[in-house]
Image (cartoon, rainbow, N blue to C red):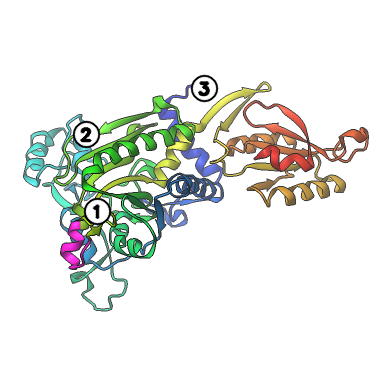
Amino acid sequence: MADIQNENKMEKIVSLCKRRGFVFPGSEIYGGFVGAYDYGPYGVELARNIKTVWWEAMVNEEKNIVGLDSAIVTHPKVWEASGHVNGFSDPLVTCNACGASSRADHLLEGIEVFADEKMTLEEINTLFDAHRNELHCPNCNEVNFGNVSQFNLLAQTNLGNFSEDWTKEPTYLRGETAQGIFINFKNVLDSSRVKVPFGIAQIGKAFRNEISARQYIFRKREFEQMEMQMFVKPEDDMEMYEAWREKRWQYYLDLGFSPENLKWHEHENLVFYAKAAWDIEYKFPFGFKELEGVHARGDYDLTQHQNFSGVSMEYLDPVTNEKYIPHVVETAVGVDRTFLAAMTEFYDEDELGGEMRVVMRFPKKLAPVKVAVFPLLKNKPQLVAKAEEVFAILSKHMRAEFDDNGNVGKRYRRQDEIGTPACVTIDFETLGEEKPELKDTVTVRDRDTGEQKRVAITELVGYLK
Ligand SMILES: [Zn+2]
């Protein structure tokens, strides 16, 4: 693949995403809304494929994992128990000149000073003060910040609360999907035939009041998570942890990511209850950043919910009659981050037939459109009718697109840009007008090599799958 300069690459990806309907800025006609993006016609297909691939690997192919779709809004106690109400915050500074908010740790990071996320407010203020003369506001460039304060990331809502001063008793848009899993641990246990060790997987939206949403869809305020919590016997958790680290690494290789764009990063300071925390980082155009977290969380979450709800979270081992609160091994990755990683990984430019082109080399599983169907000419009714017939056959098996606009070369370029693995053209030979032996065969053109083959219509579905 071509080696495309990184800064340049981010601009190219953002522009392709807008131009070809993968990602639109949120509320664009109203001047935009920071931290929100909308997925367009091809983006929604890519995001759906990302979720399907994850669900297949995490639920379908695992004997001991079941799925869940819990509500976004929960009893507010859930977030007190989880520690989010008191401890889920980022260090905020406000510019005295223009009033813009920034994250203190991000400003420090910009001058190569690293603030630990577990630092106390006092510690981070001391560090910030030592460097405040070097720190410019990203909005107005002035050097004039106030003090650092802790800003809670949970977004509040008055859903179901009709009092005027609802902010006194708010509930929250979930900050992560994991808590929905913990609060349903007992329900799943009692209603399905799962036995420890077993896992619960969930895909869903989560919300964080990010102070500085940035890096495109990497850090959004409304985002979608794919999380799996595995409940294990306390003494087995590290073995399970290592097994999941291996599986999750392999998952990205199977998806077609190159190993040199992935690396492990160990958390330097663990939260007090965690036993191990490693992230899989991906080489985004702006550098290696977290893609997925694999964490051993001990029995913290279930114990907290037991204490706050008064409901026992103990598991009774049916064989040994032992009672214990299971430990949790979790894997957590964002749909949006996987989306951006896939756009980065599979973006390519090359020369084909003497012409430069942009080509998204998505694996078939991720490609938004699996096949495009073209009548060679738009104004020949027999070709169009036959192409519509072929489209009707293929579209029952895979996402197909019909295109009769412009010449075939242009249609190829358009499909290359969105990563369609194959294009099928219905031509005069398909009609059998000159060579009867080619009747009911079509030209199939390969995205990556540009090679063309004749394939019988009756064999197309199998050939393309
Ligand atoms: Zn400013």
- The three-letter amino acid code for the residue at tag 3 is Ala
What x and y, as percent, mark residue 432?
90, 38
Q: Real-space Cα distance between discs 2 and 3?
A: 31 Å
Sequence-first tag of 1 and 2:
2
To which residue does mark 1 refer?
Answer: 320
Residue sitting at 17 percent across and 40 percent down? 270
Residue sitting at 33 percent across and 37 percent down? 243
What x and y, as percent, mark residue 82?
21, 57
What x and y, as percent, mark residue 161?
27, 75
In the image, residue 1 sits, relative to residue 229, either above or below, namely above
Q: Real-space Cα distance between discs 1 and 2?
A: 52 Å
Residue 109 image label = 2
Point out the frontmost of discs 1 and 2: 1
Q: Which residues are magenta?
A: 303-313
Q: Nearer the viewer, residue 314 or 23?
A: 314
Residue 136 seen in render: no
Residue 2 image label = 3
Q: Nearer the viewer, residue 224 or 12?
A: 224
- Residue at disc 1, secondary structure: loop
Question: Residue 105 sits in which quadrant?
Answer: top left
**On the rendered image, what quadrant is the C terminus found in?**
top right
Lateral position of residue 230 relative to residue 203, left or right: left
Residue sitting at 39 percent across and 61 percent down? 192
Residue 146 image label = none
Lateral position of residue 348 relative to residue 219, left or right: right
